[in-house]
Every structure is written in C-alpha cells, then in structure tokens.
C-alpha cells in the first residue's frame, strides 16, 4: 500500500492519541521524584538516606529491565503489528500503575514499577514508528513535535495536580485518581484511534528477517552515528533532568517551592520549543536544525557558570532551553528516516541509546561536580552537547535532503 493510502487511514485523532499515550508514560515518574520521600516512608518507616537511596533504585531496576526489553522489542517489531505492540505498551503502563498502587511491600513495588518502564519503552518506540508508517514524510516532524510535547506536558500537569490535590504525600491516591484514569484513557485512545496495518501487508518472516533488521541498523554508518549522537544529546539533557534544580537551590539559596515554580516555567517553555521545532524541521531540515540548536545552546551553559545574578541566569537558561528543546523533534525525525524498512528496530535501539545517555550524563556530571564544582559540571554538559553536534554534523546524513 502506498504512503498516501496509508496516510488516509490515520484520522484526526491519530496524533492526539499518540500524544496521550506518551503523556501517560510520564505520570508515574513522580513516584521516584516528587513522592520519593513518601514512598520511602511507606515501605521503610522513615526517609533516611539509606531508605531514600534504596527507593531510588526503582529507577535503576526499571532502566535495566527496559533496556533488555528494548532489544527484544527490536525483534518483535519485525513480525508483529506495531499497533498491537503499542497497545501492549499502554496496557503495561496501566498494569504497572495498578501493581504499584496495591503494593503491600517494597519487593512487590520492585516487580511492578519496571513493568511500567517496559510500557514506556514500547510506547516511545512504537508511537514514532507508527508516525513513520502512516504519515507522509512532510507531516511527520509536526506530529513528532506534538507527541513529544505531550510527554513534557505531563511533568507540568503532574506537578500542578500534585500541588493542588496530593500535596500531603498521598502517592497511592495520586496513582488511583490521576495516573490510572490517564492510562485508561490512553489505552482507549490507542485502541480506537490508531489504525492497524492492512491485512494484505502481513507477512511471514523467518530468522533471516530478524537478523537483517539489525544489520540494516548497525551496518549503516549514518544510522549508528545517529544513535551515538542521540546518546550524547541525551547525556547533555541530564543537566535539566538531574542537576539544574539543585544548582539553583545551592547557588542562589532558593526554596524548594521557588525552584518548583521555576521548573514549571521552564517546562512550559520546553513544551512550546518542541512544538515550534516540529514546525521548523520541514523548512530548515532535520540535520541542519538539530546541529544548529545543539551548537547554539551550549555556550549558554558555560556562561551560567560565571554569572552571579539569578534573573540573568534564568533568562539564559530559558532561552537556551527553548533553543535546545527544538532539537528533539529534529533528532527523532532524523533517526526515524534512517532505515525506513526497519523503523521499529531503529526506534527500539534509539530508546536504548537514549537510556544510556541519561546514565552517562548523570555519571559524568557527578564526577565533574566532585572534581571541579558547578563550573566543571556546566562545562561538561556543554561539551557533551557539542560532541553530539559534531557527531550529527560529520557522520550522519538526512535521507530526505539528498
């Protein structure tokens, strides 16, 4: 079936349903963020450093399980319906939320929290694979921008909802009355609004097809370089995910409430950046926009290290965050077009490298902080952004601009 015929199968709710699915995967992350102290207290009776560190290992366990499953997903995407896999991913998110809600002890929590992590990997990989399958090439970047915005928006909405209704540490109530309904809406949206691959395209595949899908990814220099570039790009993003809030609290003596409010502003800017970036990709080009935003945003991080004024630092951070945020739709669009015949495998591998990237950024940032304080940390993250820009510029090709 031709791309134009496939595209006609994707109705007006196709992209919103994928955005809602992406939105649902972020909701439970509050358990190891905002609610970390409360979850630790529930299972260990206190929030001492040992209890907090132990509870925080939920993220480590989930990441390991997710990486292992992402490898399996690369095989499954060759022979199984991408919509069916997306439904499995959405259902896993729901199952993980329910398991965490009913968890009577920490062991039970350790079993079900990674199930949600598996769902997150599947939804992330299959959502973009389906975009490549059912939307024509000039519509894909905008769709990717909106889907990514749904993920970022979840952090903003989640913070507001927690502040208004669950600020007393009711993490189980949060799962029951907010996270679970959102996941069920996501499951329904995917079921009713995402089209299935036409029956005549179903095919029987053998061992050679599975091996071929991985060869197509790892034997193409541009495809492998995209994965490596994405890893360093995500490592640079660990500045926002892990360290930026602590930097503001320590350097400018801000309260937790003030940092939370500033994070909401930064999150809103990031959502807007992803939408704008999705609209600019087709005009500027995937590779060109990706490299430019990485290169332009990195000097701002180095400047922050030498500026003592809070408001100037915030303005630089917000402007840099907007520029940096535009690279995500460009990056995913570039990765999506590298191996059209094995998009499922390519996007599954992308989730692995992105996961590695977060770990790499957190580790290198921690080492730099210990050895050279905040200045060293900021320069380290700027360097990782520039490395990513160099990898994308010198080693990748945009198949849509040959």
Image: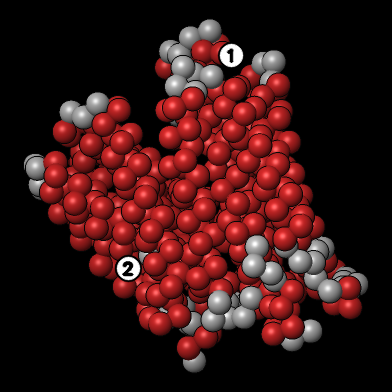
The location of residue 79, given as percent across then percent down, is: 83, 66
* Residue depicted at x 69% and y 15%: 104
The residue pinned by badge 2 equals 293
Q: Is residue 167 left or right of residue 211?
A: left
Task: Name, please, the residue furthest toward the front.
Answer: 12
Mark 1 in CB contact with mark 2 (< 8 angstroms) = no
Front one among 150 and 355: 150
**Colouring used for the render:** secondary structure
User: Residue at left 30%, top 55%?
Assistant: 321
Residue 202: x and y, percent?
A: 87, 73
How many residues crowd around disc 1 within 10 Å: few (fewer than 14), some, or many (20 or more)? some
Picture mark count: 2
Element type at mark 2? helix
Work out how far the residue at label 1 is from the one at label 2, CA to CA, in angstroms: 44 Å
Residue at far top of view: 45
- Vertical comparison of 282 with 230: above or below: below
Q: Which of pointers 1 and 2 lies earlier in the amino acid sequence?
A: 1
* Rendered view: 249 above or below 378: above
Determine whether, in the image, residue 205 is placed left or right of residue 68. Answer: right
Q: Which mark is residue 350?
A: none
In the image, residue 267 above or below residue 47: below
Q: What's the residue at 35%, 42% (across, down)?
A: 264
- In the figure, residue 272 lies in which quadrant? bottom left
Q: Is residue 395 left or right of residue 312?
A: right
Query: What percent of the width, then of the height, locates residue 105?
Result: 67, 16
Residue sitting farthest toward the bottom:
402
Image quadrant occupied by the N terminus:
bottom right
In the image, 252 versus 222, the foreground residue is 252
Residue 224 visible, this angle: no
Q: Is residue 158 visible?
A: yes
**Percent coordinates x, y for residue 234 in the rendering:** 43, 55
- Tell me the residue that label 1 is attached to: 43
């Amino acid at each position: 079936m031709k791309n134009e015929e496939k595209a006609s199968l994707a109705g007006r709710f196709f992209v919103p349903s994928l955005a809602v699915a992406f939105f649902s995967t972020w909701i439970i992350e509050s358990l190891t963020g905002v609610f970390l102290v409360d979850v630790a207290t529930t299972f260990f009776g206190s929030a001492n450093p040992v209890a907090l560190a132990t509870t925080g290992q939920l993220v480590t366990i989930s990441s390991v399980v997710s990486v292992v499953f992402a490898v399996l997903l690369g095989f499954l995407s060759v022979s199984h319906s991408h919509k069916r896999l997306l439904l499995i991913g959405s259902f896993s998110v729901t199952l993980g939320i329910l398991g965490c809600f009913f968890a009577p002890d920490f062991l039970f929590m350790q079993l079900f929290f990674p199930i949600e992590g598996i769902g997150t990997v599947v939804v992330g990989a299959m959502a973009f694979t389906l975009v490549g399958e059912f939307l024509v090439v000039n519509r894909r970047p905008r769709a990717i921008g909106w889907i990514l915005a749904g993920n970022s928006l979840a952090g903003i909405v989640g913070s507001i909802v927690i502040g208004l209704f669950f600020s007393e540490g009711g993490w189980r109530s949060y799962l029951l009355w907010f996270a679970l309904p959102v996941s069920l809406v996501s499951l329904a949206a995917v079921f009713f609004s995402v089209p299935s691959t036409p029956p005549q395209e179903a095919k029987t595949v053998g061992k050679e097809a599975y091996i071929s899908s991985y060869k197509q990814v790892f034997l193409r220099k541009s495809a492998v370089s995209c994965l490596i570039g994405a890893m360093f790009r995500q490592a640079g993003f660990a500045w926002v995910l892990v360290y930026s809030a602590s930097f503001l609290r320590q350097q400018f003596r801000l309260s937790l409430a003030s940092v939370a409010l500033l994070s909401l502003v930064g999150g809103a800017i990031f959502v807007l950046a992803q939408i704008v970036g999705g609209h600019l990709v087709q005009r500027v080009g995937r590779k060109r926009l990706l490299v430019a935003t990485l290169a332009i945003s990195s000097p701002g991080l180095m400047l922050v290290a030498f500026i003592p004024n809070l408001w100037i630092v915030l303005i630089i951070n917000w402007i840099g965050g907007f520029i940096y945020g535009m690279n995500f739709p460009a990056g995913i669009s570039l990765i999506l077009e590298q191996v059209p015949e094995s998009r499922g495998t390519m996007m599954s591998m992308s989730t692995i490298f992105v996961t590695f990237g977060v770990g790499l950024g957190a580790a290198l940032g921690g080492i730099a902080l210990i050895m050279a304080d905040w200045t060293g940390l900021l320069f380290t993250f700027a360097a990782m952004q520039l490395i990513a820009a160099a990898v994308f510029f010198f080693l990748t090709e945009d198949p849509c601009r040959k």
